[in-house]
Structures are given as C-alpha cells and as structure tokens.
Amino acid sequence: MRDAYIVTSLRTPGCKRAKGAFKDTTPEDLASHILKAVVEKTD
C-alpha cells in the first residue's frame, strides 16, 4: 500500500448549531461548496 499525504485542507464554515446561519442548510449544500473548492484548487 502506498503512503498518503495530506497537503491541503478545506472545511465548512462553523456557527452555533441551533441558532446559526446555516441551520436551514442541508449537509449536501455544504458539501457541494467543499467539492467545488477542491476542484478549483486541483484543476
């Protein structure tokens, strides 16, 4: 098995869970922003 290296990271914005700005945002919508950023960084 080949070694894997983490060379960069991305994360979703954070806020207070129950009252936060993203309380009505689905996990899929948050993940789509990360996936788009990964494509932009690795393109």
Image: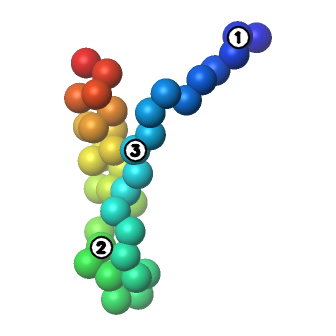
Most foreground residue, 40 or 35: 40
Q: CA distance from mark 1 to mark 3?
A: 23 Å
Splitting the image into 4 quarters, where does residue 35 fall?
A: top left
Kind of residue sitting beneath label 1: Arg
Q: Which residue is mark 2?
A: 22
Q: CA distance from mark 2 to mark 1?
A: 38 Å
Give the residue pinned by disc 1: 2
Helix, strand or loop for disc 3: loop
Q: What residue sits right under mark 3 in the picture?
A: 10
Residue 19 vertical placement versus 1 (above, below): below
Residue pictured at 27% horizontal, 47% vertical: 33
Residue 1 on image: x %, y % = 76, 11
- For this orientation, the residue located farthest to the right is 1
Q: Is 17 placed above or below 25 here?
A: below
Indicate the amino acid at tag 2. Answer: Phe
Earlier sequence position, callout 2 versus callout 1? 1
Q: Nearer the viewer, mark 2 or mark 1?
A: 1
Left or right of 24, for residue 11: right
Residue 6 vs residue 41: left or right? right
Count up the numbered dots.
Answer: 3
- For the residue carrying disc 2, how many other residues have a C-alpha within 10 Å: few (<14), some (14-19), or many (20+)? some
Q: Secondary structure at mark 2?
A: loop
In the picture, residue 14 is in which quadrant? Answer: bottom left
Residue occupying the far front of the picture? 7
Q: Secondary structure at mark 1?
A: loop
Say what amino acid the circle numbered 3 marks: Leu
Return the x and y of residue 30 as percentages of the image width and height. Answer: 33, 56
